[in-house]
Image (spheres, coloured by chain):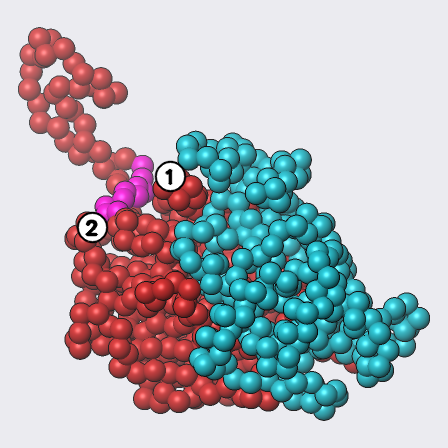
Chain colours: A red, B cyan
Amino acid sequence: LAGFGNLMQDVLWCFSQVKGTVDIGVTEADIISTVEFNHTGELLATGDKGGRVVIFQREQESKNQPHRRGEYNVYSTFQSHEPEFDYLKSLEIEEKINKIRWLPQQNAAYFLLSTNDKTVKLWKVSERDKRPEGYNLKDEDGRLRDPSMITVLRVPVLRPMDLMVEATPRRVFANAHTYHINSISVNSDYETYMSADDLRINLWNFEITNQSFNIVDIKPANMEELTEVITAAEFHPHHCNTFVYSSSKGTIRLCDMRTSALCDRHAKFFEEPEDPSNRSFFSEIISSISDVKFSHSGRYIMTRDYLTVKVWDLNMENRPIETYQVHDYLRSKLCSLYENDCIFDKFECVWNGSDSVIMTGSYNNFFRMFDRNTKRDVTLEASRENSKPRAILKPRKVCVGGKRRKDEISVDSLDFSKKILHTAWHPSENIIAVAATNNLYIFQDKVN
Amino acid sequence: MFVRGLKRKCFDGEEDIEGTLAGIKAIPSYNLQRQSLLDMSLVKLQLCHMLVEPNLCRSVLIANTVRQIQEEMTQDGTWQMINTQSTGQASLDRLVSTDILCRSSREQAEGKHVPGYSTFNKDFEGDQERESSETMSTASSVQGPRNLQSNVWEMENPQENKGTFQKSLDQIFETLENKSPNSVEDLFSEVDNSYYDLDTMLTGMMSNTKMGHCDGLETFSSTTTTPSNSNCKSDLNELDHIVEILVES
């Protein structure tokens, strides 16, 4: 495949599409809260704060226009979650979609899991292009016919109709989480999945909605002693008994479900020793891991904390094998970022299909890519100004004091309300989806 | 939220200070900045969280920061000093700039004498809990040490000349003057406590979103609840009303 596995210096990223409105005032419900390609890359799903899921489908590449790679167009839109009110606690449960995870395709229909803070749902997305006609007991509008008027029996037949894509909720997995769900992960056995909240992780069978197994519980007996929470969790891509979860203290635990029913004792514990010379009151906060992702190979895990992305080898627990600075110029601004709560922003990170490049977001609608082989990195921007079709994205640079060059932007001019928290990389091609508030940008590598 | 073009509230980083010397009235010391960070953290933990359950991760991280500060202040004796010097309720109308706190301990050792950091030690838990209940209540009355230190400022390292006082939380602090914070333990004594979130309040004020459901807020004092959905939008009048309720409760 063209562009697959290329070294980053050979890859030129181009604008492909942008979805969403350009309104000045953004409706909060339209803010994209999760982005995910399915396993083939044919479908791209987004969830938003308003509880809606929008699925884009890649159109077939046309032989007449080889320079235009398949574009993503809306395939299905549905309301996944509604706001709820918890009467016992007098608290609202947000409908915001925290995560979407696809199941591998096993038949003509597509299945995905979507979750808000409390409830996970399994959605079936299927196409209908035929319609039965010729019922005996009702007419074409669906109205019941008077049985006494029926004199002839006929067999209904299927006739073609305009393609309709319908989404139906097949399972609702509710009432299993006291705290807010931050992660869901489909197991490689395709029969189970896990959902993780701040203090607990539950294992579900797709067929059973009224029961789940609790596999991790870090809630202290006395909540006053609580100092650490679970921030993300994921199953190993190949070993169905293995999963990892990250914490607010910057640690990752790998657990093996074969050892015991309750995986409170980890099989491996990943933690980097703290650099005492870099210690400040904000050290713990910026060490809190906001995302953890296995590599496609299953050999590495990648973690994102506030200022860095780290790659860990599963066989080495005492430190990461690679550390990449995302926006180290913010280190001297931590106090302001603490005051305006930006320091608590949860950035995600993704691998490319060959695990050679990693990507994560930053502020000012910047996002960063790091090539693990060449050690080169690039900063790109998702903005409407660079939105001409196939326009090549120009690398951006933040200047950290001293003289500012013409194309550079100074740290103080960064817009902290424009944050790229969610990105996704096509499983096998150089196509990326970047969520910038209420807009979804799709970039591709340049096709010659 | 952080609007582009909005003047930064907290002075950060190393910048040319020559032009700003004339306007500087005082030099914020490390202790003052640390106190300021403590105040800010307590406000973040205590401000009313309107309707949605607070983010537990964020609350835990802030509480851990508060514990760290407390522990350090206990170690260098500042905690005791605040206790004895407190002169009653004080207005929290200023947060000093906290740029020193953004620097790592190595940088601080080079530039200025500051108490060394200690790694968080479980042994401190017991002492801390005993002390914090009596000392936490004074955390909001910081006028004492500030007055004390206004004389101290002149003795501070002149390199600390830079810094601006921030007043971004003025309005919030004035309304919270009379509210005494609970101890850190109480903050987590019940999972279902409604935490107070400065950010959500400010965000709600500016973006006019879901918070401020007047019906929903009544539930804090009454047991009957009425479901109110996105039909109820907040405006500043309702927000003032809400803050009044909090202060009086």
As for residue A240 lying within the magenta part, the answer is: no
Amino acid on which the number 2 mark rests in the picture: Thr
Spatial CA span between label 1 and label 2: 22 Å
Where does label 2 land, which residue?
A: A209
Going by the image, does A224 lie left or right of B211?
left
- Magenta stretch: dominant SS? strand
Q: Chain of mark 2?
A: A
Identify the residue shown where x is 14% and y is 31%.
Answer: A157
**x, y percent for residue B150:** 82, 71
Residue closer to the observer: A16 or B108: B108
Residue found farthest to the top: A148
Residue closer to the observer: B157 or A222: A222
Secondary structure under badge 2?
loop
Where does label 1 land, which residue?
A: A87
**x, y percent for residue B119:** 52, 84
Identify the residue shown where x is 27% and y is 42%.
Answer: A168
All told, the count of numbered labels is 2
Magenta segment boundaries in residue numbering: A162-172
Q: Pointers 1 and 2 in contact (CB under 8 A)? A: no
**x, y percent for residue B63:** 52, 66
Q: Quadrant of residue A259?
A: bottom left
A407 shown above or below A33 = below
